[in-house]
């Protein structure tokens, strides 16, 4: 039985398509089965050097899941979200009875189209305390913790080390070059990170390390980190469900930021280096397993949206994923 019209399915597809993803790879598809909508992980989208375990791919699917749930609620329907511990289907959203969306849910839904990845310096680092608290609260949920990092000297030391390793990793650099899109603008189609969205500065501003990314002195980098607004997302465990939950929480925070005229970007690549997450958790006394670092602030310049695949590619053809 058809539950949603073609137009309503388009609303869901557009919301999912606007979710952030590792290297803008958009590793998801949707399968609609009556009252159930499956979010499918596209495992054929593989970043073997950046994301060998597929953790960032799952974080991306978690972000898409938040958008999917918000879109269902914006259509005036209740829904239930079930995360899957294995298989290609990472989550199922079951559409329920008519229900007016809460003001908060609708505000976050409206922010989906305004969310941007901003890999540049911010206008200034002053974010009102109440706004900062609202972002932290938006991400806190069972099993997920949002932490304002301390010991920036230790964080600077770790990020400096990661920059040197990634900058000299030829395999990683080749993969990043493949995923650097040369399309840009407000109507660009495709995947990959737009060249004009990248930055030649040091971490955390650069976001993605390239061969020319500078490595400042640890003390200088610590000062730069102190001028940023940073959050670290941690989970109690390190399973697939934890990765999805972290991605969903990160997107709620990012949309909350967008609803308050803020922009942000995510840093995950250092966390894939052997031993980095364990050292980060120990040095910063984190309450769990670090999954992502989020920086946010007011933009100094407007950022164009990343290119997106055609909406038709979100739905698998008969017989499986594309």
Image: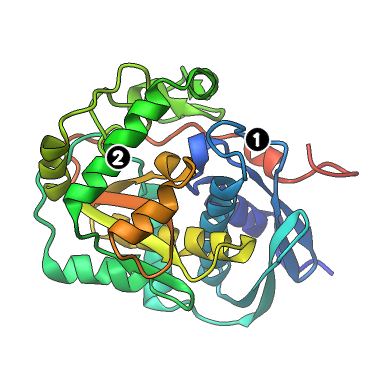
Residue depth check, mark 1 versus mark 2: number of the one nearer the observer: 2
Question: In which quadrant will I find the N terminus?
Answer: bottom right
Asked if residue 186 is positioned above or below residue 59 in the image, the reply reads above
Residue named by callout 1: 46
Residue at the far right: name it.
319
Residue in the foreground of this view, choosing between 210 and 138: 210
Residue in the foreground of this view, choosing between 62 and 3: 62
Horizontal and vertical percent position of residue 255: 37, 58
Mark 1 or 2, nearer chain start: 1
Horizontal and vertical percent position of residue 226: 12, 49
Q: With 101 as the anchor, is 253 left or right in this view? A: left
Q: Is residue 235 visible?
A: yes
Asked if residue 280 is positioned above or below residue 166 in the image, the reply reads below
Graded by Cα atoms within 10 Å as few (under 14), some (14 to 19) or many (20 or more), the crowding at tag 1 reads: some
Q: Is residue 185 visible?
A: no
Q: Quadrant of residue 137?
A: bottom left
Q: Say which residue appears at 72% left-offset and 37% top-offset.
A: 44
Q: How many angstroms separate mark 1 from mark 2 (CA)?
A: 24 Å
Graded by Cα atoms within 10 Å as few (under 14), some (14 to 19) or many (20 or more), the crowding at tag 2 reads: many
Q: Quadrant of residue 222?
A: top left
Q: With 14 as the anchor, is 84 left or right in this view? A: right
Residue named by callout 2: 159
Could you say whether the residue bearing mark 1 is in a helix, strand or loop? loop
Q: Say which residue appears at 46% left-offset and 17% top-offset.
A: 182
Horizontal and vertical percent position of residue 75: 56, 68
Q: Say which residue appears at 55% left-offset and 30% top-offset.
A: 191
Count up the numbered dots. Answer: 2
Horizontal and vertical percent position of residue 65: 57, 60
């Amino acid at each position: 039985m058809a539950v949603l019209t073609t137009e309503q399915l388009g609303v869901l597809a557009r919301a999912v398509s606007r979710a952030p993803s590792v290297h803008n790879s958009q590793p998801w598809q949707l399968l609609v089965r009556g009252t159930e909508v499956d979010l499918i992980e596209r495992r054929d989208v593989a970043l073997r050097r950046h994301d060998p375990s597929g953790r960032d791919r799952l974080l991306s699917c978690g972000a898409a899941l938040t958008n999917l749930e918000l879109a269902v609620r914006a259509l005036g329907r209740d829904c239930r979200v079930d995360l899957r511990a294995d298989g290609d289907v990472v989550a199922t959203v079951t559409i329920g009875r008519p229900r007016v969306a809460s003001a908060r849910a609708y505000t976050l839904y409206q922010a989906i189209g305004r969310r941007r990845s901003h890999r540049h310096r911010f206008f200034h680092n002053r974010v009102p305390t109440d706004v900062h608290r609202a972002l932290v609260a938006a991400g806190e949920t069972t099993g997920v913790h949002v932490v304002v990092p301390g010991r920036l000297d230790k964080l600077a030391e770790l990020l400096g080390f990661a920059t040197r390793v990634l900058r000299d990793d030829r395999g990683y650099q080749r993969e990043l070059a493949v995923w650097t899109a040369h399309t840009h603008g407000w109507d660009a189609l495709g995947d990959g990170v737009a060249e004009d969205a990248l930055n030649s500065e040091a971490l955390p501003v650069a976001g993605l390390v390239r061969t020319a990314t500078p490595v400042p002195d640890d003390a200088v980098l610590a000062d730069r980190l102190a001028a940023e607004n940073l959050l670290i997302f941690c989970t109690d465990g390190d399973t697939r469900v934890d990765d999805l939950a972290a991605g969903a929480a990160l997107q709620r925070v990012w949309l909350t930021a967008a609803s308050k005229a803020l922009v942000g970007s995510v840093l995950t690549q250092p966390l894939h280096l052997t031993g980095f997450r364990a050292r980060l958790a120990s040095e910063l006394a984190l309450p769990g397993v670090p999954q992502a670092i989020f920086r946010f602030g007011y933009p100094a310049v407007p950022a164009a949206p990343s290119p997106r695949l055609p909406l038709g590619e979100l739905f698998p053809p008969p017989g499986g994923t594309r």
